[in-house]
Image (tube, grey):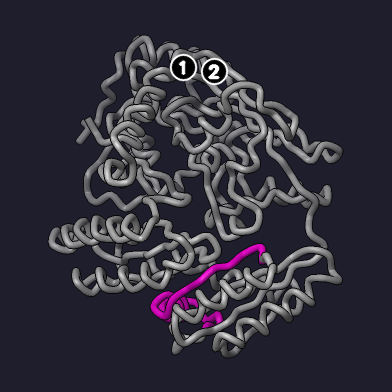
Amino acid sequence: MNTQLTKLKNNVIEELKKIAGSANILTEYEDRYCYAYDATAIGEELYLPDVVILPENKYQISEILKIANENSIPIITRGAGTNLVGGCVPLKGGIILHTSKMNKIINIDKNNLQCTAEPGVIVEKLQQEAEKQGLFYPPDPASLKVSTVGGSIAQSSGGPRGFKYGTTKDYVLALEAVLADGTIIKTGGKTIKNVTGYNLNQLITGSEGTLAIITEATLRLIPDPEERQVLLACFDSIDQAVKAVTGIISAKITPSTLDIMDKNTMQTIEKFHKTGLPTDMDAVLVLEVDGFKESVGVQAEQVAGICREFGAENIRTSRNRQEADEIWFARRSAFGAVARLSPNVLTEDAVVPRNKIPDMVRNIRRIADKYNLTVCIMGHIGDGNIHPNFSLDLRNKDEAKRFEKAVEELFDAALSLGGTLSGEHGIGFSKSAFMHKALDKKNLELMKSIKNVFDPKGILNPDKVFERR
């Protein structure tokens, strides 16, 4: 545990104040305390940063990094702190760079279907501004009302629309970033096609702040669909729901979202928010179809018909935007509702091939029963991304130990079914110990070599992605 006082030398603090201004430097214990955590439940351990800096531009970040690199001070970049794998936790103290003041949408280019934004821009705000121009930014992390552009790129965030539209990585055209030594670089470009050399865009996207610090992003936009319609279909079993999804895809229909919730999730949501979910059914699908107005109604009818063929009951179809929002409110309430069951909620995001989802769900339930843990299962069934949300109290040492064993078995189950550790949350430090199970030795060696090229002193978000040293 870090001490109350900062470990940085006074002359370093004074240099940082000259760069960013005293008002943007937080050194008091009370100010730094909240930055010891992100949205990840990590127990009672306190990882306190030595200083928190709120930079206002890339030049300040560049100068800060020069000082940090020279003095081997860890740097952890932070957006909204909605990370679920401990990605923003300052495990070795050091400097937190909080990008909330770099929150400008620089431009929205309607002719070229793209926009440029600073890292502190809220994802939902970007979507809203794009919609005013008749455009659409599809990536939709569950925390989009607070999550930032920079954070979503660093984690390569996903969301319900990933099945049809892809995830954040599919919309990054260009990046401006600062390297560990303070060098400002630009990757990618403003063209859709670009195979000029190695794709450094994609390398930085999803690197969790371990390779560079993003200061600006140019993102691809698409035309906003004319119409959207949401359906909620209830099933007696997860197996039926999966078969219905396969039937929909086989019929050459591509819903914009294909999400699933199990009985425990629905019962938990209804306990705290009365949304009309069927608590006696084993699973519910939340599906959204979009496109031209003339086609959406036809798609919705076809989807409903296929769901009925596979045993769906009580199919609810939105008739307007309000009803669609009500269905999505129920789905997006899931994590918050589960969080009210116990002091802590820990969510995983293993991915398996879509046809293996019933097997994975059975494994999750078996593991939860084995270790006497409460679990609510939801996820993006269209791309096989399952989110088991475990509700527990990490102050209970026995329960915390049981959870650790359960998670290891959960990842083993996912890997045995041809899946992997993460679909959208990333690795952070909470999954780093399992990387050797998902990737072979050579893969890990190559990744570490890349890290060393970008960050020879290892100051950028240390002890993330790879096992702690």
Q: Residue at x 59, y 45 (%)?
A: 168
Disc 1 element: helix
Q: Residue at x 44, y 19 (%)?
A: 454
When the figure is inspected, residue 441 is found, relative to residue 354, above or below; the finding is: above
Residue position for label 2? 60
- In the picture, measured across the screen, residue 182 lies left or right of residue 27, that is right
When the figure is inspected, residue 210 is found, relative to residue 144, above or below; the finding is: above
When the figure is inspected, residue 81 is found, relative to residue 253, above or below; the finding is: above
Highlighted range, magenta: 255-277
Q: Nearer the viewer, residue 163 or 330?
A: 163
Q: Residue at x 62, y 47 (%)?
A: 123
Q: Residue at x 22, y 49 (%)?
A: 44
Residue position for label 1? 64
Q: Nearer the viewer, residue 95 or 142?
A: 142
- In the picture, measured across the screen, residue 99 lies left or right of residue 48, that is right
Dot 2 and dot 1 residues touching (CB under 8 Å): yes
Tell me, yes or no, whether the highlighted magenta stretch contains residue 256: yes
Q: Nearer the viewer, residue 366 or 264?
A: 366
